[in-house]
Structures are given as C-alpha cells and as structure tokens.
Image (cartoon, grey):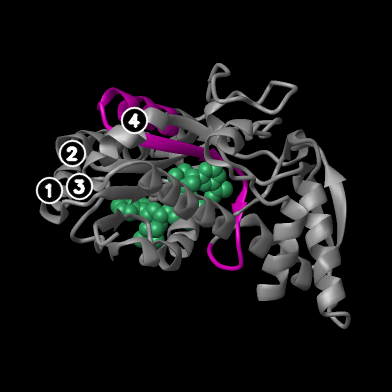
C-alpha cells in the first residue's frame, strides 16, 4: 500500500505511538499545527484536499477534561466541528476515517461494562463535545470507524501513570480515588489495534473500493484495556512494579479515598468500563490486559 495516511495529533500519546506503526502501511503525512489547526475548520478542509489521503487517522483532540468546563467553545470546535469537517472532506475523496472517542460519553452510572449501543449521557463538556464529534462524523456520510477508549497511558506523554510515579517519588503518602472503576489502556496497544484494523480492511477489497469496505464495518467500537481496576488499584500496582524494578527507590504508600474527597471541576464517571466484544468479533483483536501492558510500560520507563 503506497497511499497516504493523514495523521493528526502526532505529538499526543496515541498519535505518537501511531507514527512508527502506520509507517509500514503508507506514506504518513503529519501536518504541523500552523498548517492544520483543528480549531480552524478551513485549515482542516484545505489540508485534506491538498493531501488527498486514503486514510485519515485522527487521535488529536481537546483532552483537558477539567479545563473544558470553562473552554466549551474551543472543546467543541476541536472535538466536534473539525470532526464534521474531516468526515465531509473524507467523504468527498472516498477516504476512510479512524477517529477516537471516550467512555466520558456515558454518564458512568451503569453497573456493567458499557456496550457501544448503550445510551449516552455525558456529565461534562469534554464528554459532550466528544459525543458531538461522534454524531458529526456519523452525519457526514464518511466511511468511518470510531474507537472509544479509556484511561490512556504509556511511557511518554501526560498521563496518570507518569503523574503518580512522579508524586510517589516525591512524597511519603498519596491519596488516590478508589471508587471509580475502569481499565487502563496502553497507547501503543491502541495504535497496534489501529494498524491491525487498517490491514484487515485493506485485505478485504480491491484498492479502489476502500470507502465501501470501511462502510461495511463502519461505526463505533469499544477499545480499552482488558481487566478492570480503580485508579487506586492502578496506582498500587504501578508502584509495586516500580519497586520490583528499582528496589532501592523510596516510593509513597497509597491511601484509598472516595471521589467526593477529591473534587474536580468536571465530574468523573464512576463506571468507565467498556465491553470490547465487538472489536473482537469484527476485527479479531483483543486489547491487552492492563496488568500485562503496565509491566511492559514500566520496563520502558
Ligand atoms: N487520554 C485519555 O485518557 C483518553 C481517554 C479516552 C479517550 N481518549 C481519546 O483518545 C484520543 C487520543 O488521546 P491522547 O491521550 O493521545 O491525547 P493527548 O495525548 O492529549 O494528545 C492530543 C493531541 O491533539 C493535538 N491537538 C490538540 N489541539 C489541537 C488543535 N487545535 N489542532 C491540532 N492538533 C491539536 C495535540 O497537539 P499538541 O501536542 O500540539 O497540543 C496532541 O498531539 C483522543 O481522541 C481522546 O479524546 C483519551
């Protein structure tokens, strides 16, 4: 495959992992921010028409969950309006779109892992803007795949694991929320999944029919790490693994606290668990158990 893949958000957690994994699949075009700013829909349309990609992979997003509460316009511009533009331009050139969304589209009150078709009800601006992006992409008529994920982390980037390990090295005790349930998802596992899905789709049809083959599987897929835990459980396991790796390190003990003892501007879902069966049955891909990915990530730190 020698076609172009337009990749956004290459400086982010998922985008950074996608760069080397997409490279064998096509010529990757990574626009600079001054060329394509997702807050500027015209620049999005211009770049897509100039590049004429076969695939558009869009992990870029406004991801500042708390700040979104006071920057609603910007969050919607990046997470919804630009996604509509991506969809419309993709449709006009028959490109396939791979987009990412979040468990924050749900209200988090459910007691089971969420399925793709469960009713949504975001509790904050970030989740609402991501949900608006999902809807905009669906309405655009593009051939698209949306992967909803949760608790993304890795050896680089801004994420809970790195924050907690830094804090654990600086302090004697940490307080971490123990009543929000979910599954940490390794950014590299997500990127591997995307590369696998692109290959699966490409295998099914002749080159000229890409958008038609994506259309056959288009829709939303849940893609979060296997197993489940709480933020407290994640922190405890991360510190335990780190102690194994660096026995001489002095790392904090972790106390379990309730969500109400850690107030944040945006409400967090109590249940972030996602049922990933559809990903398995459609694309034959099982996301890594979070404990296995954590072991690999800690080894890379
Ligand atoms: N992180 C999580 O826990 C989590 C959970 C569920 C779902 N998701 C979703 O998964 C996807 C990937 O998340 P991530 O963790 O990789 O995000 P991330 O690390 O925060 O990266 C976001 C990327 O978007 C880019 N970006 C932000 N504003 C932009 C703009 N106006 N124009 C162009 N690019 C812009 C950033 O560029 P700069 O570096 O230049 O700012 C960065 O490359 C997103 O759709 C996110 O909503 C994430």
The one of 134 and 2 positioned closer to us in this rendering: 2
Q: Which mark is residue 49?
A: 1
Q: Earlier in the sequence, mark 3 or mark 1?
A: 3
Q: Earlier in the sequence, mark 3 or mark 2?
A: 3
Q: Residues within 10 Å of mark 3 (few under 14, many from 20)?
A: many
Disc 1 or 2, which lies upstream in sequence?
1
Between the C-alphas of marks 4 and 3, the distance is 22 Å
Residue at 82% x, 67% y is: 241
Calculate the distance from the C-alpha at mark 3 to the C-alpha at mark 1.
9 Å
Dot 3 and dot 1 residues touching (CB under 8 Å): no
The residue identified by callout 4 is 215
Residue at the far top in the pictured view: 119
Q: Reading the chain from its start, which is encountered first: label 4 or label 3?
A: 3
Work out whether mark 4 precedes mark 2 in sequence or the reverse, and give the earlier one.
2
For the residues bearing labels 3 and 2, Cβ distance under 8 angstroms:
yes
Q: Position of residue 126 (x, y in %)?
A: 47, 36
- The answer as to whether callout 2 falls within 8 Å of ligand 1 is no
**Residue 179: quadrant of the picture:** top right
Task: Estimate how packed mark 2 is, as few (under 14), some (14 to 19) or many (20 or more) residues with alpha carbons within 10 Å.
Answer: many
Residue found at x 18% / y 49%: 48
What stretch of residues is rendered in magenta?
A: 129-157
Circle 2 sits in a helix, a strand or a loop, which is it?
helix
Q: Which residue is mark 2?
A: 89
**Ligand 1 neighbours mark 1 (CB distance < 8 Å):** no
């Amino acid at each position: 495959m020698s076609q172009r893949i337009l990749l956004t958000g290459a400086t982010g957690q998922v985008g950074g992992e996608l760069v080397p994994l997409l490279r064998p699949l096509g010529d990757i075009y990574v626009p600079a921010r001054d060329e394509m700013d997702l807050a500027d829909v015209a620049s999005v349309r211009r770049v897509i028409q100039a590049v004429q990609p076969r695939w558009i992979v869009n992990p870029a997003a406004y991801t500042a969950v708390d700040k979104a509460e006071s920057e609603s316009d910007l969050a919607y511009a990046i997470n919804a309006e630009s996604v509509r533009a991506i969809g419309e331009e993709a449709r006009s050139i028959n490109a396939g779109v791979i987009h990412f969304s979040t468990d924050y589209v749900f209200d988090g009150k459910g007691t089971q892992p969420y399925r793709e078709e469960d009713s949504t009800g975001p509790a904050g601006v970030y989740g609402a803007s991501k949900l608006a992006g999902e809807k905009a992409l669906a309405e655009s008529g593009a051939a698209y795949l949306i992967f909803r994920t949760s608790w993304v982390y890795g050896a680089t980037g801004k994420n809970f694991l790195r924050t907690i390990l830094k804090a654990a090295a600086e302090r004697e005790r940490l307080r971490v929320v123990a009543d929000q349930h979910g599954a940490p998802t390794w950014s590299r596992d997500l990127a591997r999944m995307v590369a696998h899905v692109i290959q699966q789709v490409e295998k099914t049809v002749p080159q000229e029919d890409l958008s038609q083959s994506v259309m056959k599987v288009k829709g939303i897929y849940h893609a979060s790490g296997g197993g489940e835990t709480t933020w407290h459980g994640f922190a405890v396991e991360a510190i335990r693994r780190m102690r194994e790796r660096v026995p001489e390190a002095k790392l904090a003990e972790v106390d379990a606290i309730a969500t109400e003892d850690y107030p944040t501007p945006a409400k967090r879902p109590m249940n972030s668990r996602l049922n990933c069966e559809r990903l398995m049955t459609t694309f034959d891909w099982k996301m890594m158990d979070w404990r296995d990915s954590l072991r690999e990530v800690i080894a890379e730190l």
